[in-house]
Amino acid sequence: EELQVSSIEMIACNVTKDCEPYLNSCQLTDCQDGMCYFVLDIFAEGCCNEPSDCDPKDCTKSMCIENTCAYTDSSDDCEPGVLDYLGAIFGFCILGLLVITFLVVTMVTLFRTFFKKLRFNTPSNKVDVLLEEQKNEV
């Protein structure tokens, strides 16, 4: 549980360690003349004094709440870049090639099936000979 200390409150101490329970992650402390002194440490990871102290992140808006960086989603800051467009173009090209490949394979399969049926429907020479022999016998 983190103890909150207002800037007006005075905390008595004998050594700096007495002040540590009142620290937050963005403060440094020191015990001087029997009192705790707290100093903002904006160079610590995730600490700030104002939103511009926070590391920028894509598609988010920075806020500084109680000296801690906070982020909210922001569609205003999320515009597609050049790599996004290149990725979309590359993806559509791959998709197009897959569709063309599927159509070519389907057409080849249909033509092979059609020509096999056509070839088997024409009488072969042996069948012709047998039919002629039967006609001659009658």
Image (cartoon, rainbow, N blue to C red):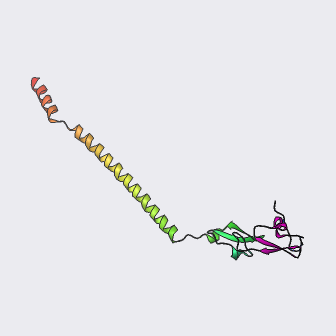
Residue sitting nearer the eye, 119 or 135? 119
* Residue at the extreme top of the image, as rendered: 138
Q: Is residue 25 magenta?
A: yes
Query: Where does the image place residue 128, in percent across and percent down from the top left?
Result: 14, 33
* Residue at the extreme left of the image, as rendered: 136
* Span of residues in magenta: 15-41
Residue 61's quadrant in the figure? bottom right
In this rendering, is residue 107 above or below 82?
Answer: above
Residue drawn at (34%, 53%) of the image = 104
Image quadrant containing the C terminus: top left
Query: Where does the image place residue 53, in percent across and percent down from the top left?
Result: 69, 75
Residue 57's quadrant in the figure? bottom right
Residue drawn at (80%, 72%) of the image = 29
In this rendering, is residue 137 above or below 83?
Answer: above
Residue drawn at (64%, 72%) of the image = 56
Q: Please indicate whether residue 23 sits to the left or right of residue 80 in the image.
A: right
Residue sitting nearer the eye, 25 or 94? 25
Image quadrant containing the N terminus: bottom right
Q: Is residue 39 magenta?
A: yes
Query: Where does the image place residue 111, in percent across and percent down from the top left?
Result: 29, 47
Residue drawn at (46%, 61%) of the image = 91
Q: How many marks?
A: 0
Residue sitting nearer the eye, 123 or 109? 109
